[in-house]
Image (spheres, rainbow, N blue to C red):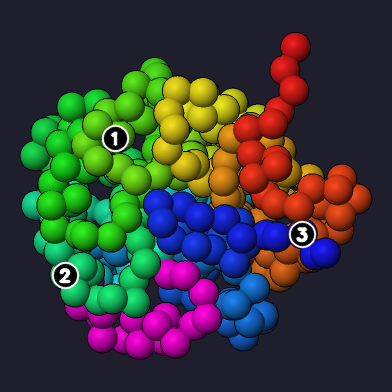
Amino acid sequence: MKPDLKVKIAGVEFANPIMTASGCCGYGEELATMFPLSKLGALVTKSITLNPRLGHPPPRTAETTSGMLNAIGLANVGLETFITEKVPFLEKQPTKIIVNVAGSKLSEYVEVCSRLNDIDSIDMIELNISCPNVDEGGMEFGADPVMTEKSLKAVKNVFKRPIIAKLSPNVTSIVEIAKAAEQGGADAFSVINTLLGMAVDAETWQTKITNNKGGLSGPAIKPVALQMVNAVYSNSSLPIIGIGGIRSTEDVIEFLLCGATAVQIGTGLFVEPTLPVKIEKELLQYMKRKKTDSIYDLIGKVRKY
Ligand SMILES: Cc1cc2nc3c(=O)[nH]c(=O)nc-3n(C[C@H](O)[C@H](O)[C@H](O)COP(=O)(O)O)c2cc1C
């Protein structure tokens, strides 16, 4: 019998545990020219904000050792254009659709989530709480447990399907933030967003991206992400989507063993856009070889000393 790749998160069933990560395949149109999106468990969109944003001027990405630094500045088409121009394409795709939502004040998050609630083809929202809160003086929503709980409560009031809280690693205790998100009504967690970093040119003395600091992603962050997934897994019963540096099937298995129910691939898509297809195939081969029938035979099964 073929092993079963299906997983369920907050009542939503996914054909397999492989998703795209926000910001790494726009709204899916380009990726769909490379492989049928039915191969994905879910497509996660770029962060959507209430108004369109151009983001930071270039250069806004830089390659680093085993990673990539980016400060795109949440460039996106904005809610209205997303609904009129992107959703019609997305709702035709034979995969689950998760819309990532960002904002700089709580009222923005609420307005965007409230509008998205009317669109039945959107299966879930992923809340990017790693944005500076303008009202509270620029501190990130997701770095403050009180703001985290408040944000989740507010969006849960207006969006009636499941909400995933995407957690930032740039905090003292990710477990504390996860608990606050759960208290606010989060249905699942995405772990992790990028790590704050900086890149400098030794010849010109110039920082490599215009925002000077940015988010580090790619293989360099995988060990950090695995630890954080496992810490959240050990302290909460909510499902976790593991993110950070995935470039191979082995990477995916490591995230599942540490407690993730599904994973997202971000930077890896820039290097190998068809990576999700390869991983789906190899995951089946791995499960046959290990004689495991279900993804659930792997979740959280890491053997620790
Ligand atoms: C170019 C780029 C843009 C990103 N944009 C977003 C975004 O808009 N919203 C968000 O929540 N995360 C964003 N991320 C973070 C990714 O979704 C992911 O959490 C992170 O890159 C770690 O995964 P990876 O190592 O597989 O890339 C972005 C990452 C990159 C590299």
The verdict on residue 81 being magenta is: yes
Q: Is residue 204 visible?
A: no
Q: Give me the residue at 18% from left, 51% from top.
A: 155
Residue 31 vs residue 62, the one in the foreground? 31
Rendered view: 246 above or below 275: above
Contact between marks 1 and 3 (CB within 8 A): the answer is no
Q: Where does residue 289 sit, x and y in percent of width and height?
A: 91, 50
Residue 229 vs residue 291, the one in the foreground? 291
Would you say the beta carbon of the disc 2 residue lies within 8 angstroms of ligand 1?
A: no
Q: Report which residue position mark 1 lands on.
A: 181
* Image depth: mark 1 or mark 3 in front: 3
In the rendered structure, the answer to whether residue 55 lies left or right of residue 44 reads left
Q: Secondary structure at mark 2?
A: helix
Q: Main secondary structure of the magenta part?
A: helix
Mark 3 neighbour class, 10 Å CA radius: few under 14, some 14 to 19, many 20 or more: some
The verdict on residue 216 being magenta is: no
The alpha-carbon separation of the residues under discs 1 and 3 comes to 33 Å
Rendered view: 258 above or below 243: above
Residues drawn in magenta: 79-97
Q: Residue furthest right?
A: 289
Which badge, 1 or 2, comes first in the chain's sequence?
A: 2
The quarter of the rendered structure image containing the N terminus is bottom right
Corner quadrant of residue 120? bottom left
Which badge, 1 or 3, comes first in the chain's sequence?
A: 3
Specify the label residue 115 is tagged with: 2
Rendered view: 27 above or below 41: below
Q: Report which residue position mark 3 lands on.
A: 3
Corner quadrant of residue 168? top left
Say what amino acid the circle numbered 1 marks. Ala
Q: Where does residue 80 sit, x and y in percent of width and height?
A: 20, 78
Q: Residue furthest front?
A: 1
The alpha-carbon separation of the residues under discs 3 and 2 comes to 39 Å
